């Protein structure tokens, strides 16, 4: 992992990238039916737009709970890698979960944060990460040693490939632009949950 | 049901026993004084994975994920913590039809000394009823095993959450020492 120290958002050199492009890159790394929890809002919409997978859970509410849901899946299925995709605003709503993630020390868990410094979906009000809060420093301070900013697209690819080897928990943050999401998730929570459970093989006597 | 009650059996022995009998292996909690003997017993039993979270809605998110991954979980909290979870109930647990097992140590009644606890307590049942979430207040130890056993099975069979409100009549509650101003 690239563990170069950073102090504040303005101080690090991470390139500003695009969420949909990075989401597609992430999905391209998934070869072993890894589970992905898409946080509410644009993280989830771009995950939807990157192609339907039975191992994706698309959140339609409960802002901030993508990481806790991923923790639950990772505990239930220790041999499957689990990825939480969350925005900066959602993470800031539930920072305590980072301490829980570090304490549980789940090797099969990766957290990916899309940080554009705004609450994009509600009118682009600035988040605390726009000027002052460094989300990677917060994650490292919570006890997640493998925490890094993705410097550019190639670095993002390297960090994801490394995380999927299972030495986690890993925390990868990417600075992204304010482009809108490419798609909009279908709003049917029961179907989303049921498809996900079948995708994880969690339904007894399921045939497919 | 195979459970037999003895004179030395306590409410927390029964809760632990029924969780095991129903294969509830994950217990996530925000600590509570009254629940301490239950939490200690769960930690001492290797059947369970148990840990504290920083927030009650975080605990609900974790057991939701665990259920979807094939592992049954329960959350433990006190009444004031319940006040932090309506959004997680209304936007995740209920619409996704997840059989979350929610245990609440009831504060705010039968001798409460903290006004804040008393007021949050008054919101709890109306919130659960407005969401049509099954909620059962348990006051008697002789009914505890039956209620837990049947309700856990119902939650799983109907894919719906259930809240067990453990009354001070069952647990003894937190005792007022008479020295607050």
Image (cartoon, helix red, strand yellow):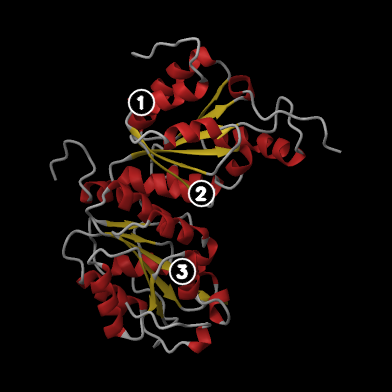
**Dot 1: chain letter:** B
Give the residue pinned by disc 2.
B57
Q: What SS does tag 2 mark?
A: helix
Give the residue pinned by disc 1.
B153
Picture residue at 41% right of the left edge, 81% below the top: A176
**Dot 3: chain letter:** A
Quadrant, the C terminus of chain A: top left
In this view, B129 is above or below B138: below
| Mark 3 → mark 2, Cα distance in angstroms | 20 Å
Q: Which mark is residue A139?
A: 3
State the residue in front, B145 or A49. Answer: B145
Q: State the image coordinates of residue A34 (x, y, percent, origin top left).
A: 23, 60
State the residue in front, B10 or B89. Answer: B10
| Mark 2 → mark 1, Cα distance in angstroms | 23 Å
Picture residue at 70% right of the left edge, 38% below the top: B117
Q: What SS does tag 1 mark?
A: helix
User: In this image, B60 relative to A192: left or right?
Assistant: right
Q: Residues within 10 Å of mark 3 (few under 14, many from 20)?
A: many
User: In this image, A197 relative to A148: left or right?
Assistant: left
């Amino acid at each position: 992992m690239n563990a170069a120290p950073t102090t504040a958002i303005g101080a690090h050199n991470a390139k500003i990238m695009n969420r949909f492009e990075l989401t597609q890159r992430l999905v391209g790394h998934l070869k072993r039916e890894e589970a992905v929890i898409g946080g509410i809002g644009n993280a989830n919409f771009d995950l939807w737009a990157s192609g339907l997978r039975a191992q994706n859970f698309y959140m339609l509410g409960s802002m901030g709970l993508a990481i806790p849901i991923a923790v639950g899946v990772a505990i239930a299925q220790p041999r499957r890698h689990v990825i939480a995709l969350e925005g900066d605003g959602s993470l800031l709503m539930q920072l305590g979960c980072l301490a829980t993630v570090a304490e549980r020390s789940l090797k099969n868990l990766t957290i990916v944060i899309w940080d554009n410094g705004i609450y994009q979906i509600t009118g682009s009000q600035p988040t605390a990460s726009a000027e002052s809060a460094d989300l990677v420093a917060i994650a490292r301070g919570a006890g997640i040693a493998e925490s890094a900013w993705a410097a550019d697209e190639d670095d993002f690819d390297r960090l994801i490939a490394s995380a999927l080897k299972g030495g986690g928990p890993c925390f990868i943050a990417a600075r992204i632009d304010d482009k809108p999401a490419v798609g909009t998730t279908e709003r049917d929570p029961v179907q989303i949950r049921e498809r996900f459970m079948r995708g994880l093989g969690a339904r007894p006597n399921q045939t497919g | 049901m195979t459970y037999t009650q003895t004179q030395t059996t306590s409410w927390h022995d029964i809760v632990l026993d029924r969780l095991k009998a129903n294969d509830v292996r994950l217990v996530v909690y925000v600590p509570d004084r009254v629940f301490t003997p239950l939490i200690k017993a769960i930690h001492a039993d290797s059947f369970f994975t148990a840990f504290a979270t920083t927030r009650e809605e975080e605990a609900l998110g974790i057991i939701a994920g665990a259920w979807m991954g094939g592992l049954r979980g329960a959350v433990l909290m006190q009444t004031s913590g319940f006040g932090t979870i309506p959004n997680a109930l209304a936007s995740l647990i209920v619409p996704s039809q997840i059989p979350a097992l929610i245990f609440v140590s009831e504060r705010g009644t039968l001798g409460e000394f903290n006004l804040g606890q008393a007021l949050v307590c008054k919101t709890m049942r109306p919130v659960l009823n407005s969401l049509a979430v099954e909620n059962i207040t348990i006051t008697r130890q002789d009914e505890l095993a039956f209620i837990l056993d049947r309700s856990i099975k119902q939650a799983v069979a109907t894919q719906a959450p259930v809240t067990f409100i453990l009354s001070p009549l069952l647990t003894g509650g937190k005792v007022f020492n008479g020295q607050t101003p």
